[in-house]
Structure formats: structure tokens, C-alpha cells
Image (cartoon, grey):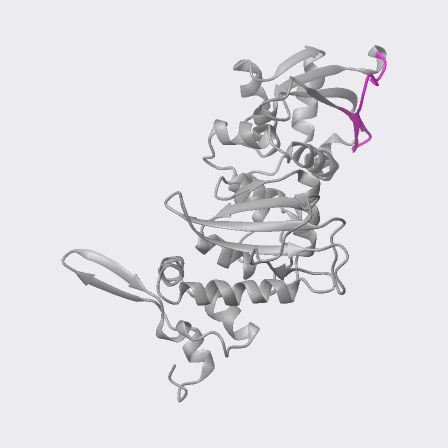
């Protein structure tokens, strides 16, 4: 590193792009190779201002292991003072072109003094009841997660990141693991901006949406949509009164039997109340104006503006039983966030 140059200038070096024989190669700035003696702010700023192409090259180059070690240290530092409900081993399986090239493993212990996470090298045997979470992503995505430049839930929805583990454990670990750049939880569905979710789902395949709604986060997705629905009522719906039952079908897992999640959406004087039904509970038939039924993947599309309700009905992807006028009124009363 050239110590005679101001730190600010070194941090904002642009990647070097060279052309040889028609091939374009990208290398990381010269300043990024020395991390051991750099402070957290300096490292995070360097990563944040390095382009994706240069950062990916850096991560796969000779100083890539040093980068991962330093980012892991910062992730550990940012997670201090918070404790999990039960011991969790979090493994970041970092892949390139489908092949795992490195692993970052962190152990979160419920009884650890001061809480937080610690690197785990496998030398110490773990108890049989330690829970496991596996996050599959590229080294580039891992770096962007640590710097707060991307969101794990959004990356999951966009099919750029995979997660294995039950939802409760993932959410618990994600609450403890904190982005050192801004202190936010690595996994916080409640913090997602609806339009960002809609944008993340642009172009995502039906197969992926189906896998999300058959995976451990089905309940999280349904719960977040139901919680936020009252925020999206148009002012012109102030005099509308109706009750709709929304049925979301599909197995919660690939090997699970068919299930149906049900919600009662009540609209009164411009206000919406959403109640999730469990067991045999259901409102009396006299209180239902309409019942709407769709699959989990189409529910995601409807809730993010990627499928218009009228189009869904015409294509047979949204079944309507009861007062179709009430279904249309409900559709026009909601200002569904759309991709930006």
C-alpha cells in the first residue's frame, strides 16, 4: 500500500480494466490486498466502493482468504452482546459456478458470556442438540451482506441465495448476526420495503416461487404480507364494507401433505383487518361476501404486483366463490406495491 497517498483516495480507487486479445479482465484495486492492519471502517469502505467484478476477482484471487477472514472477524464483532435462544452452527457455503469453494462457520452459543458468534474450525465436538443453518451464496454476496449492501431475505426471494434450516432457527441466528456497517440484523423480514420485495421477484421462475412457499419461510412470507396489507388501502375505499376469505393452498414442504392457510380480510370504513384462521375456525357464512383461492406462488405474485387479480381470475389462477363484485372492490381498494 502506498502510505504517502491519502486514505480516502486509496479507498476509492477504481478497478483496473485491461483488454488483451479481445478479452476483458478486471482486477481489484492495489489497495485492497492488505487487510490485517486495517480498521473496520476502512475495510468496509474499501469493499463497499469496489465494483462487483473487481470484488469477485479479489475474492477468488490470492488475497481472497484474507478478505474472508477479515469480513468474518467484522461479522463476529458486530454480533457481540446478543444471544440466541439455542445453540446454532451457521455455515456460509460459498460457491462459484455451482461448486463450493470455501466455508465460513460461526458458532452461536446460547450460554456464551456476552452472546454473539465465534468462528468454528471443527476442532471442538458439538453437542447433538446444536441446530444447524446453512447459507449458500457466492463470496461476492457474502461480502455485500457483511457491508450491508444487500439483504439476505431479498437475495433469497430473488433466487440468489439459499438457506437450509427451520425458519425459527434461521430467524434467531439472523437476529444475532449483525451487519457491522450499520448494525442491522442479517435476517429481518419485518424490515423489508414492499417495493424492494416486488423488484426482487421480477423475472423469478415459478419453480423458485413454489420452492419458497414450500420451504421453511412460507409462514414468514404469509405473516408479513398479512401484517402489511392494512398499510395499502386507497383513500377512495373509505366507505367500503366487505368481508373476504383468502385461501392459500399448497404443501408447506415438498414432502408434506396439501395444506390451506386461511385469512379473513375485513374492510370497514377504509380500514382493513386481517385475521389468520387456525384449525376449524371460520367466520359464519353470512359474514363472507367472497372467498378467494390461489396457490402459494400465485399469492406471492398477487401480493407484489406481478399478477393482476383480474388476469389471475381469467387464467384460472385465482378462484372466486361468492360475490364477484366484492372481489373486484377488494382488488381496487388495495394499492399493491409494484416493482420500482
- Is residue 266 on the magenta stretch? yes
Q: Give the x, y percent position of residue 282.
A: 82, 17
Relative to 159, 17 lies left or right: left
Describe residue 164's horizontal placement relative to residue 273 as left or right: left
* Residue located at (54% from left, 27% from top): 210
Farthest-out residue, left: 21
Count up the numbered dots.
Answer: 0
Could you tell me which quadrant the N terminus lies in?
Answer: bottom left
Residue 291 lies in magenta, yes or no? no
Q: Position of residue 312 (x, y in %)?
A: 56, 19
Q: Nearer the viewer, residue 170 or 328?
A: 170
Q: Nearer the viewer, residue 141 or 303?
A: 141
Q: Which residues are magenta?
A: 263-284
Q: Residue furthest bottom?
A: 4
Which of the 4 quarters of the picture holds residue 21? bottom left
Q: Is residue 162 above or below residue 317?
A: below
| Residue 176 visible in the picture | yes
Residue at image location 47% in from the left, 74% down from the top: 35
In this picture, residue 100 sits left or right of residue 76: left
Coordinates of residue 179 in the picture (x, y in percent): 61, 60
- Residue pictured at 70% horizontal, 38% vertical: 224
Front position in the image: 244 or 50: 50
Q: Measured from the top left, where is residue 253 in percent x and y?
A: 61, 26
Q: Is residue 339 visible?
A: no
Q: Quadrant of residue 223?
A: top right
Question: Where 116 falls versus 248 (above or below)?
Answer: below
Amino acid at each position: 500500500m502506498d502510505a504517502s497517498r491519502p486514505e480516502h483516495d486509496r479507498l476509492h480507487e477504481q478497478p483496473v480494466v485491461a483488454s488483451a486479445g479481445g478479452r476483458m479482465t478486471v482486477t481489484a484495486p492495489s489497495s485492497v490486498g492488505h487487510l490485517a492492519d486495517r480498521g473496520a471502517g476502512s475495510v468496509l469502505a474499501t469493499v463497499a466502493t469496489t465494483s462487483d467484478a473487481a470484488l469477485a476477482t479479489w475474492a477468488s484471487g490470492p488475497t481472497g482468504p484474507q478478505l474472508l477472514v477479515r469480513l468474518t472477524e467484522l461479522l463476529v464483532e458486530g454480533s457481540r452482546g446478543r444471544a440466541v435462544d439455542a445453540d446454532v452452527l451457521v455455515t456460509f457455503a460459498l460457491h462459484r459456478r455451482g461448486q463450493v469453494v470455501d466455508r465460513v462457520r460461526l458458532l452461536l452459543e446460547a450460554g456464551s458470556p456476552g452472546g454473539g458468534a465465534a468462528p468454528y474450525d471443527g476442532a471442538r465436538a458439538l453437542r447433538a442438540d446444536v441446530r444447524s443453518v446453512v447459507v449458500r451464496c457466492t463470496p461476492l454476496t457474502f461480502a455485500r451482506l457483511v457491508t450491508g449492501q444487500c439483504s439476505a431475505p431479498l437475495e433469497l426471494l430473488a433466487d440468489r441465495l439459499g438457506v437450509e434450516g427451520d425458519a425459527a432457527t434461521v430467524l434467531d441466528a439472523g437476529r444475532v448476526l449483525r451487519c457491522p456497517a450499520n448494525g442491522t440484523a442479517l435476517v429481518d423480514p419485518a424490515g423489508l420495503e414492499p417495493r424492494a420485495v416486488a423488484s426482487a421477484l421480477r423475472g423469478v421462475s415459478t419453480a423458485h416461487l413454489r420452492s419458497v412457499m414450500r420451504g421453511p419461510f412460507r409462514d414468514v412470507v404469509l405473516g408479513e404480507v398479512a401484517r402489511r396489507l392494512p398499510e395499502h388501502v386507497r383513500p377512495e375505499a373509505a366507505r367500503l364494507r366487505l368481508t373476504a376469505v383468502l385461501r392459500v393452498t399448497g404443501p408447506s414442504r415438498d414432502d408434506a401433505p396439501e395444506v390451506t392457510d386461511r385469512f379473513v380480510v375485513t374492510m370497514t370504513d377504509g380500514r382493513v383487518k386481517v385475521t389468520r384462521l387456525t384449525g376449524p375456525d371460520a367466520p359464519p357464512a353470512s359474514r363472507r361476501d367472497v372467498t378467494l383461492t390461489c396457490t402459494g406462488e400465485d399469492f406471492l405474485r398477487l401480493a407484489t404486483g406481478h399478477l393482476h387479480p383480474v388476469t389471475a381470475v381469467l387464467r384460472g389462477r385465482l378462484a372466486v366463490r361468492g360475490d364477484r363484485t366484492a372481489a373486484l372492490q377488494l382488488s381496487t381498494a388495495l394499492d399493491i406495491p409494484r416493482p420500482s
